Amino acid sequence: MRKNRQMTRTRRIVVGTDGSSTSGTTLEWAARQAELTGSSLEVLSIWDCPTSYGANPIPSDFDPRAEAANGVDGVVKGVRDDFPEIAVHTHVVQGHPALTLEEASHEADLLVVGSRGNGEFEGMLLGSVSQYCAQHARCPVMIIRQ
Amino acid sequence: MIMGHHNGMDHSPQHRDHLHDGSHNPVKARVVVGIDGSDTSWDAFCWACGETRRLGGWTVAVFVGPTPGAASATATASFTGPAIAYGAIQQSMSDQAEKLSEQVRAYGHDHGVDVAFVQTQGDTARELLRIANADHADLLVVGRSTKARHRIAGSLGRRLMGRRGAPIIVVVP
């Protein structure tokens, strides 16, 4: 999809979350920026099937997609309460965090990421999501110190 | 420093309550941006000014020139050849700085944004962080490095991110 360049289009700010409280600071900064610029806030809850080497059986009721969907609703409620005037949209996306955010940047005016990988997206190397996004995103990337 | 003119910018408290200092006085935002004459740094500067216009405050454009030692190392030098023209290198850096200074101030004037120009020398990442921290900058903005050698050695954005005490960093493609 080509980027819509009409003058009246709504600006979009994209931020990723894994639903944990550690992403709250990043989300808050993204919301502030959305308020400042009159942009919508697109919150991506990114999940993927965990890789397993067969040591532990995966419980039959394990549903990472549902967990991602429920998690994002919880964190976004706080943002909606604190920033009632911005349009907040949630998206539950399966994929690798860095690649997913980079792809989302094609349709975004700003991408907001946390500086540390740990806690933001479990299993990622320290800072690798933010580093990848900073180097490859199509739009400016705001990196929140954690 | 020049005093630009404010064009009806929004100074309402709810936009800047997170910028108050301890005494609850509204503090003007400071957005530090590194410029080096490249296209991406110019884009970074424009982005920074957009932010300053919204926040109300200053864009601080920082040009980090190489130290004279580094400048001479990049120039072709030979022990048996003529003496290295340090004066010429310094002059060329001064010319570049002056040109950048004029460009950023003209932009600030045209767009109603307060712009300050700072010239310094040394390691780019260290200098930008030093100035950003000394100025209590809200944001540090850099252009994404496109030079191949930066990708190998570590782009400026990546080096800034890894440092302790780095303020919020924006990398503009």
Image (spheres, rainbow, N blue to C red):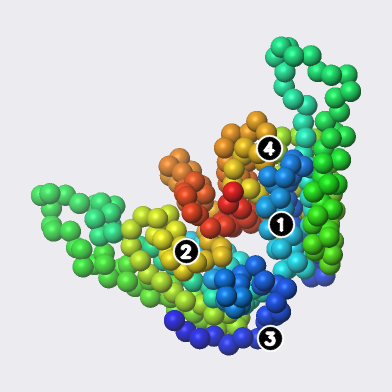
- Residue, disc 4: A121
Q: Chain of mark 2?
A: B
Res A18 → quadrant: top right
CA gap, disc 3 to disc 4?
41 Å
Q: Are marks 2 and 4 on the same chain?
A: no
A21, B24: nearer the viewer: B24
Residue at image location 75% in from the left, 14% down from the top: A56
Q: Position of residue B138 (x, y in %)?
A: 56, 65
Which badge, 1 or 4, is on the more N-terminal residue?
1
Q: Residues within 10 Å of mark 1 (few under 14, many from 20)?
A: some
Q: Which residue position holds label 3?
A: B8
| Residue for point 68% across, 37% down | A121
The kind of residue tagged 1 is Glu
Report, in whole angstroms, how far the alpha carbon at label 2 lies from the one at label 1.
Answer: 22 Å
Q: Secondary structure at mark 4?
A: loop
Foreground: disc 1 or disc 4? 1
| Residue count near mark 3 (Cα–Cα under 10 Å), binned few <14, some 14–19, many ≥20 | few
Image position of B70 with respect to B26: above or below: above
